[in-house]
Image (spheres, grey):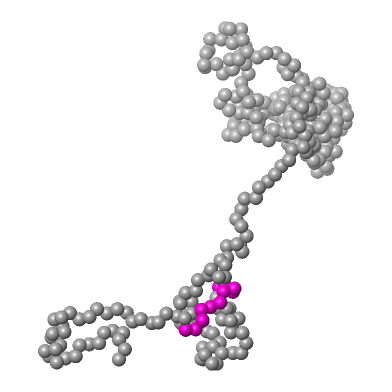
Amino acid sequence: MAHRFSRDPEDDGWERSDLPILCQSCLRRYVRMTRADYDDECKVCTRPFTVFRWRPGQDARYKKTMICRTCSKIKHVCQVCLLDLDYGLPVQVRDTASSTYSGDYVPKSDVNREYYAEEYDRKARLGIDYESSYGKAQPSDTIRKLQRTAPYYQRNRAPPCRFYARGICKRGAECPYRHEILVAGELSRQNIRDRYYGVNDPVAAKLLRKAGEMPSLASRQQATAYRGSPPSYYNSPHPQSRTSYPSMNPQRMGAQVPYQEGFNNRPSGSTDAQQRKHYSYQNSSPPSQGNYPPYHPPYVPSPSPDQQYHHQRTGLRSPPAMGAQS
């Protein structure tokens, strides 16, 4: 660890934290973490920091934080995989696509790097917005093509078994490691500091080559189809097809209309306009007077022959049927 020239003797400069800064792929859900204060030094600034360790799944490997929270905030990256927190891309891809190279203002020497981290922590405690512009600018076309919209949990798989590669693994299905033989390539040689500063990153170089082969998003034509209900006026029936019922007579329903005194005592003016306001549909006219069906009394069955003979012998008159007019 670099020798410190702290201006505050009470401040040790070591990081204490309760929660790590992680991406969704590294964290997952329903995990239990172990925390160890000052258990390891940061791989970038070499300052002791709080290390978190957990296992994101039954078939996953154990993970732990590699850099401190201060270095993670400066570059806006995850403390484990060192990928961008918003887009899930390496630092070199993000800086190249956004045309902002951040490796110039981040010092690399031991003393300057520690002083830079202390100044960042001091301004963060005071609530001063730092010069970092990550998460504020609009993403470019390259970033939108390469960004990861869903978590990628394949990175959490267990490492390959070394004994299986030698052919001497005897644990079989109970082996917690993968029984695969990996082919060594350019992606197997990575450095944590190179990934953090965004230089000589083989994963970033592969993604940039892939972005050059992909078509531009502006050339794609997008068409949307409207799926919804028609406007409300289409649901209204046509005035000529509306049906009027006798029960809609306002006089029989007991409605208070201005012409209840009589047919000849109607107020002057348009009678259609005065009658139309008592109906739900303003465009349809009410039924005219005299078009209502005639009133029929309820049906009453005729008396039986025995009752008719009894009335004839006694001289009584049979009672009239209900509803019959006298």
The secondary structure making up most of the magenta span is: loop
In the shown orientation, is residue 204 left or right of residue 270? right
Q: In this view, does 138 lie above or below 177?
A: below
Residue 41, magenta (yes or no): no
In the shown orientation, is residue 287 left or right of residue 185? left
Quadrant in the picture for residue 38: top right
Q: Where is residue 139 in the image (x, y as percent from the top left)?
A: 78, 38
Number of marks in picture: 0
Q: Nearer the viewer, residue 169 or 248?
A: 248
| Screen quadrant of the C terminus | bottom left
Question: What residue lies at 81% left-to-right and 21% top-to-bottom?
Answer: 200
Q: Position of residue 17 (x, y in %)?
A: 71, 34
Q: Nearer the viewer, residue 128 or 293?
A: 293
Q: Is residue 292 above or below residue 170?
A: below
Question: What residue lies at 85% left-to-right and 38% top-to-bottom?
Answer: 131
Quadrant in the picture for residue 127: top right
Can residue 215 be spotted in the picture? yes
Identify the magenta region: 280-290
Question: What residue lies at 56% left-to-right and 26% top-to-bottom?
Answer: 58
Question: What residue lies at 35% left-to-right and 81% top-to-bottom?
Answer: 296
Residue 283, magenta (yes or no): yes
Can residue 204 be spotted in the picture? no
Q: Position of residue 235 (x, y in %)?
A: 57, 62
In the shown orientation, is residue 220 left or right of residue 323? right
Q: Position of residue 241 (x, y in %)?
A: 53, 68
| Screen quadrant of the N terminus | top right
Q: Nearer the viewer, residue 110 or 170?
A: 170
